[in-house]
Image (cartoon, rainbow, N blue to C red):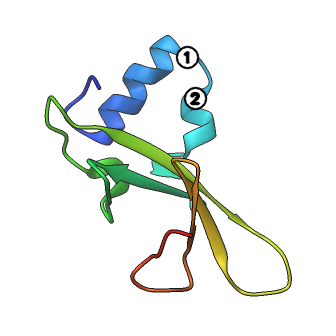
Amino acid sequence: MIGSTVREAIESLELQFPGIRERLCEGDKIRPNISVLVDGHVTPLKIRERLQETSEVHFVVRISGGSGTETHVFFRSKVCKASTWPLKLE
């Protein structure tokens, strides 16, 4: 990933894939329904998270629905229930 922060990485992606920034961001922030994982960990810093040259970044869209209050996060073809902590893969 090119960039020293998630923000710079998104700008780099925008050059390669026009429109990706608009899908990931609202203004200068990551959209509220998107989590940012850096090297396998959800980062609370989101767009300000610093990256290493070898960092791997994932943008995960939260999906909710149904009758319960659970939020399901799809990550690498597995489902996590965000209502349980720690998150458990099913």
Q: Position of residue 13 (x, y in %)?
A: 44, 22
Q: Nearer the viewer, residue 7 or 68?
A: 68
Q: Secondary structure at mark 1?
A: loop
Q: Position of residue 31 (x, y in %)?
A: 56, 54
Residue displayed at 49% across by 21% down: 14
- Residue 34 quadrant: bottom right
Residue under pointer 1 = 17
Residue displayed at 45% across by 76% down: 87
Q: Position of residue 81 (x, y in %)?
A: 58, 75
Q: Nearer the viewer, residue 53 or 31?
A: 53
Furthest residue in direction right, as rendered: 67
Q: Is residue 30 above or below residue 79?
A: above
Residue under pointer 2 = 20
Q: Position of residue 42 (x, y in %)?
A: 35, 61
Q: Nearer the viewer, residue 47 or 51?
A: 51
Q: Nearer the viewer, residue 73 or 7?
A: 73
Could you tell whether 84 is left or right of 51 in the image? right
Q: Is residue 56 above or below residue 15?
A: below
Which of the labelled discs sits on residue 81, or is there none?
none
Residue displayed at 67% across by 82% down: 70
* Amino acid type, residue under disc 1 in the picture: Phe
Badges 2 and 1: C-beta atoms under 8 Å apart?
yes
- Residue 77 visible in this rendered orientation of the protein: yes
- Residue 31 visible in this rendered orientation of the protein: no
Quadrant, the N terminus? top left
Furthest residue in direction left, as rendered: 52
- Residue 17 quadrant: top right
* Amino acid type, residue under disc 2 in the picture: Ile
Could you tell whether 86 is left or right of 77 in the image? left
